[in-house]
Image: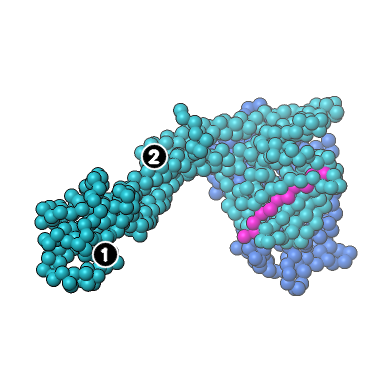
């Protein structure tokens, strides 16, 4: 209940638009969201969604993939043409392929059904925080980035080594890397890194940022004896040493 | 039906046996015929020669003075025909036996002038032609006798052997050619059998519709049947996948509702049940969807995947260790391989309390080893645990979630990469699963 108080203290409730064709699930989602201090709106189809978005300010959209008429992916594309409002896709498919399609179309996150209340609320908060706090500008979220021969695709959450090898990162590791490339060649404090790298992951790992950094270092290690990509700044935090190019 | 032990079961085998018998028969028959005609032709030739000699000698000797005759007889003798001249008549004529009579007729037939001459034929005790020696005596005008001794060879072996040899070469040639022909006739059938084996493994195999009429019909029917089976299978898979998807919405409602349950132990139990159902649906969908939309292969760092999964397991409070290099590249489908390795680690941590993942490169293959300290699996069950929807029916089976698809998904992912999966038990106890994946 602390959450509610905090949300209330933070000003007017943020509005969440739920686009879901299953009426009972829609009702449940509305109830859960209201219980957690959000202003919830709901639509059963793309048409209703468009009407609601035209009439109300919406801070985040929860978009079901399987909808009658234009499906969630179509709607996601339509929204992105006009607005940068955060979108979380809800899907009955836990497919990696579906997840990638959603993220490529500009969705900010992808949650597979069935999700728990805790997971849903945590993800909504994380995305809203990221959007409002300007942790990442929209371009950073979407465009390809390169550094030192490496390239990362934030949409597909993909990391390619200088040799063209796909390197698997965990969610937290990827978010940590995104935090680094967003502020390259600058010292970033541990607290800040922890906050940014937890932006997405809700499975609260109690691992310290040092463990995450060492895992990331190992995965991004190369044979070349150059300067390490991530250097420790004793007592403060870390610095990402490479220059980052966009595109 | 005739039951012969040596009767081969294969169509080609049977046809070959028939062919061998036929060719053998032809071979024997023709060689007998060949020998006979050769024999007759040869004997006839020898008789002709003899007849000519008789006529020529008679003319010469009739003209020759008596004193010169003995010497002349010696000079005209050859190895084949010995000639003697004498006043003495030959032994009294034996009654002409059948063969001798025929020989005489042959001589007269060649030289009709001899028909009126007194000519005696006899042989060694009447055993001609078994005994090759033939004697002919011809009475000259002055009443003296010319004696001819010759051999009429009944079996010219060189010729007969040559005949047999060439017949044999011919027959073998025919045999080899027709065996090859039969083999090629059997090829469509063998293709069909091979295809039928492969179909069982879930692939669609098109059999070339070729070969003899019957075989072609079978191939056509086979392809059509395969199409129907594939459609049926696809329809079922689709239905199952649709149900699995549709179940997620009510599950999502249930999960959201469960958060409203006040009693925390009930809520916790409900959440676990929902998790279990979700895991079942996930494994079912990944099993069904594995082949429907294959992800592309790409160069992938297997070490990074192993580290991600092992780290996730340790973060969740399990004992998991990764042993291996920081990077190991293989050309695989990363999502499928990550899911496979994740299944193996989950298995290891379900049945044991510790999982060790090791990775190494060997002969161009990436070797991924997952070991646990659980009870292992009896060797006779190795094949069974790889079957979909199979779980070992022991006491430990029930405390696991899922549909028994975990290892099937692993096996399929590994097979799709052209790799291999090997199960084994560790000496210290526990299961040991080895995935081998081609690196390039």
The spot of residue B85 in percent (x, y) is: 21, 65
Residue B432 among magenta residues: yes
Secondary structure under tag 1 reads strand
Would residue A16 appear left or right of B103 to someone viewing this image?
Answer: right
Q: Position of residue B61 (x, y in %)?
A: 15, 67
Please give left or right for residue A123 compared with residue A17 in the image: right
Rendered blue, the chain in question is A
Closer to us: B407 or B401: B407
Q: Position of residue A70 (x, y in %)?
A: 52, 38
> Which residue appears at 85% of the width and 29% of the height?
B264
Please say if B405 is above or below B424: above
Which of the two labelled residues, at mark 2 and mark 1, occupies the earlier sequence position?
Answer: 1
Q: Quadrant of residue A34?
A: top right
Please give the chain letter of the residue carrying mark 2: B
Q: For the point 77% across and 43% down, which residue is it? A: B346
**Closest to the observer: B178 or B408?**
B178
- For residue A235, which quarter of the picture? bottom right
Looking at the rendering, the stretch of residues picked out in magenta corresponds to B430-440
> Do the dots labelled 2 and 1 sit on one chain?
yes
B213 in magenta: no
Q: Residue A75, can we see it? A: no
Under circle 2, the secondary element is helix
Q: Which residue is at 60% across, 31% downward?
A: B240
Judge whether residue B421 can be spotted in this image. Answer: yes
Disc 1: which residue: B82
Q: Residue furthest right?
A: A235
What color does chain B have in the rendering?
cyan
Q: Which mark is residue B216?
A: 2
- The subunit carrying tag 1 is B
């Amino acid at each position: 209940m602390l959450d509610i108080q905090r949300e209330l203290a933070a000003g007017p409730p943020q509005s969440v638009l739920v686009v879901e064709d299953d009426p009972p699930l829609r009702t449940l989602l509305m109830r859960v969201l209201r219980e957690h201090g959000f202003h919830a709106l709901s639509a059963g189809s793309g048409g209703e969604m468009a009407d609601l978005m035209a009439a109300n300010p919406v801070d985040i959209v929860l978009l079901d993939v399987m909808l009658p008429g234009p499906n969630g992916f179509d709607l996601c594309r339509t929204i992105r043409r006009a607005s940068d409002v955060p979108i979380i896709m809800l899907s009955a498919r836990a497919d990696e392929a579906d997840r990638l399609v959603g993220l490529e179309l500009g969705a900010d996150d992808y949650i597979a059904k069935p999700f728990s209340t805790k997971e849903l609320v945590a993800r909504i908060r994380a995305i809203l925080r990221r959007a409002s706090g300007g942790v990442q500008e929209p371009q950073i979220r979407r465009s390809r980035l390169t550094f030192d021969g490496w390239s990362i695709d934030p949409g597909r959450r993909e990391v390619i080594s200088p040799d063209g090898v796909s390197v698997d990162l965990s969610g937290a590791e990827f978010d940590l890397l995104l935090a680094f490339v967003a502020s390259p060649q600058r010292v970033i404090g541990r607290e800040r890194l922890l906050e940014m790298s937890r932006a997405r992951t809700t499975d609260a790992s109690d691992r310290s940022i040092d463990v995450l950094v060492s895992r990331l270092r190992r995965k991004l290690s190369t044979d070349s004896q150059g300067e390490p990509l991530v250097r420790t700044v004793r007592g403060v935090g870390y610095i990402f040493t490479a220059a980052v190019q966009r595109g | 039906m005739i039951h012969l032990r040596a009767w081969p079961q294969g169509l080609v085998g049977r046809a070959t046996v028939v062919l061998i018998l036929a060719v053998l028969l032809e071979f024997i028959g023709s060689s007998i015929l060949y020998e006979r005609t050769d024999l007759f032709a040869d004997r006839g030739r020898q008789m002709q020669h003899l007849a000519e000699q008789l006529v020529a000698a008679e003319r010469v000797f009739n003209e020759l003075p008596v004193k010169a005759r003995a010497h002349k007889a010696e000079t005209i003798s050859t190895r084949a025909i010995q000639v003697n001249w004498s006043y003495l008549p030959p032994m009294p004529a034996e009654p002409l036996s059948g063969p001798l009579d025929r020989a005489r007729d042959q001589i007269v037939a060649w030289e009709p002038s001899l028909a009126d001459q007194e000519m005696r034929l006899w042989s060694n005790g009447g055993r001609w032609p078994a005994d090759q020696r033939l004697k002919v005596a011809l009475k000259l005008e002055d009443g003296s006798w010319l004696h001819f001794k010759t051999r009429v060879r009944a079996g010219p072996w060189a010729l007969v052997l040559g005949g047999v040899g060439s017949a044999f070469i011919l027959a073998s040639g025919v045999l080899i050619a027709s065996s090859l022909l039969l083999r090629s006739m059997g090829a469509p059938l063998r293709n069909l059998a091979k295809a039928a084996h492969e179909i069982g493994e879930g692939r669609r195999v098109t059999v070339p519709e070729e070969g003899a009429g019957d075989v072609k019909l079978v191939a056509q029917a086979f392809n059509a049947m395969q199409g129907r089976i594939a459609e049926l299978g696809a329809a079922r898979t689709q239905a199952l996948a649709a149900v699995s998807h549709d179940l997620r919405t009510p599950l999502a409602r249930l999960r959201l509702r469960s958060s409203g349950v006040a009693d925390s132990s009930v809520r916790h139990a409900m959440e676990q049940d929902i998790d279990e159902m979700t895991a079942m649906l996930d494994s079912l969908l990944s099993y069904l969807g594995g082949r429907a939309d294959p992800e592309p292969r790409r160069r992938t760092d297997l070490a990074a995947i192993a580290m991600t999964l092992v780290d996730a397991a340790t973060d969740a409070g399990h004992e998991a260790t990764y042993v291996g290099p920081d990077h190991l590249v293989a050309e695989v489908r990363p999502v499928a391989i990550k899911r496979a390795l994740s299944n193996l680690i989950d298995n290891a941590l379900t049945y044991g309390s510790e999982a060790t993942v090791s990775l190494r490169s060997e002969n161009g293959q990436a070797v991924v080893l997952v070991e646990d300290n659980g009870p292992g699996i009896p060797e006779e069950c190795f094949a069974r645990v790889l079957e979909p929807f199979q779980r070992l029916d022991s006491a430990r089976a029930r405390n696991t979630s899922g549909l028994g698809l975990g290892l099937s998904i692993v096996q399929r992912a590994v097979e799709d990469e052209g790799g291999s999966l090997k199960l084994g038990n560790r000496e210290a106890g526990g299961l040991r699963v080895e995935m081998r994946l081609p690196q390039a």
